[in-house]
Image: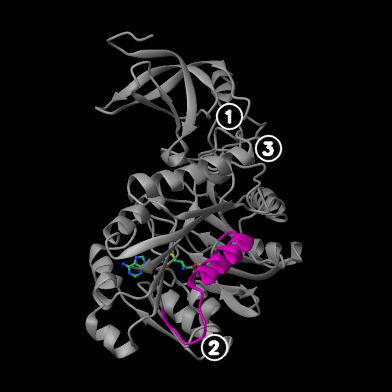
Amino acid sequence: MRRKRNIQIDNLELVTAGAKGVAIGRTEEGKTVLVSNAVPGDIVNVQVVKSKKNYFEAKIVSFLKYSDDRVEPKCMHFGVCGGCKWQNLSYDKQLEYKEKEVYGNLTRIGKIEDFSYLPICSSKEQYNYRNKMEFSFSNARWLTLEEIQSGNEIQEKDALGFHIPQQWSKVLDLKECFLQAEPSNTIRNKVKKFALEQGMEFYDIKEQKGFLRTLMIRSNSKNEILILVQFFKEIKEQREAILSFIKEEFPEVKTVMYAINPKGNDSIYDLDVQVYSGDGYITEEIEGLKFKIGPKSFFQTNYNQAVNLYEITRDFAELNGDEIVYDLYTGTGTIAQFVSRKAKKVIGVEAVPEAIEAAKMNAEYNEVTNCTFYCGDMKEIFTDEFISQNGRPDVIITDPPRDGMHKNVVETILRISPRKLVYVSCNSATQARDLELMRDKYEVIKVQAVDMFPQTHHVESVALLKLK
Ligand SMILES: C[S@@+](CC[C@H](N)C(=O)[O-])C[C@H]1O[C@@H](n2cnc3c(N)ncnc32)[C@H](O)[C@@H]1O
């Protein structure tokens, strides 16, 4: 039932999930209603907050029935913390909705028919799968409603954890987080305790002052750890005290690094990072290939699923050793090196100079001699001249960022017409848009979704296209 003004929709059954994990229902008239903070199977009363021609966006007024697919969230911070929003939905259902989302985008936006849709590749680890976390120090801890309503003076205002969504200056003080395996929680909690005992100042985001800024924990599959601490300013004695504490306290920590960051943001890419102890990197290994991981290196955050993703990509490419392969948006050249043993030569292209430097260094380290890496913006570097210099590709592997490929890149691919294209994507909507542009020339043979990020709505998708 619906009132005209100030529209409330009662008894709305949420039947599926859509983009960004939103739950979806339909009014009696058949209009789509997008509802946040709910899961499919819930029956709810909602208030419309945005009315569009084809859909409503609504917020929950009350729950009439909770979905049978709900599970108890594992983390005490669920609902407050911005991450892991699907912790309250069973993993089987998460996979089902991710699979549906990819299929829906490919058929609706991509207008693709008759392709083989392989079952989603699920993640062995549903928790503790991340190899990189960054926590923020703040003197403005996010307070619970009870704390505010109690009227008591707040004693402890320092926090080490995650920024609150839409409330950037506030930080949730994490007691636990199930995204990264131990000793991640132990390190974070002990570092905070030590800092408080030593009277170190936590960062004041609003006023931009204080001392401790961020704590980055990177791990590899052997559970060796790299730590990077960002300080707002140099206080040598305190800096050495906390870095030495980290080095001595945790045997898993192989290297400790730091940066002094007086900027307005936490990005480390333009900072001079210093090594306090160890080599300044840890090493990850895939099929005997080694990759050096420093604090600035890009590396897929779910290691086991990255291996699965790369295997699917290589299987889809069906290489026989004679091909010239291009790996577009190569990052640190991981896919390029992963497929290199099965190709004549591989050309990797990437915009970030540090990533290309790392790609070259890793290839040398691995004694891979048939990969060449170039740095540049894809839409500018991927020219006819570039292709005549490096050879016309038989196979293109492309793994663009969320926005998908620039239309000039799609046009160039169409013009040079490689026999096969393997399109790896972290956003199946833009992947579908790009595939639609190639529909006349390419047939989509098969697609497989890969779940890199359990407990979130994010999903990766790999598609094989063959020249018609
Ligand atoms: C999804 S990541 C690829 C990751 C890589 N395949 C891997 O598995 O490690 C996308 C990459 O595209 C790069 N990139 C983004 N825009 C680009 C552009 N216009 N030209 C070239 N590379 C770009 C990013 O720096 C990033 O490394």
Task: From the viewer's perspective, tell me whether residue 383 is left or right of residue 463.
Answer: left
Q: Which mark is residue 408?
A: none
Image quadrant where residue 85 sits = top right
The residue that disc 3 covers is: 74
Q: Is residue 289 above or below residue 438?
A: below
Where's the N terminus, which quadrant? Answer: top left
Q: Quadrant of ligand 1?
A: bottom left
Q: Is residue 60 above or below residue 342?
A: above
The residue that disc 1 covers is: 154
Ligand 1 lies under 8 Å from the Cβ of mark 3 = no
Q: CA distance from mark 1 to mark 2?
A: 58 Å
Asked whether residue 307 is drawn in magenta, I would say yes
What colouring does the structure picture have?
one colour
Q: CA distance from mark 3 to mark 2?
A: 43 Å
Ligand 1 lies under 8 Å from the Cβ of mark 1 = no
Asked whether residue 161 is drawn in magenta, I would say no
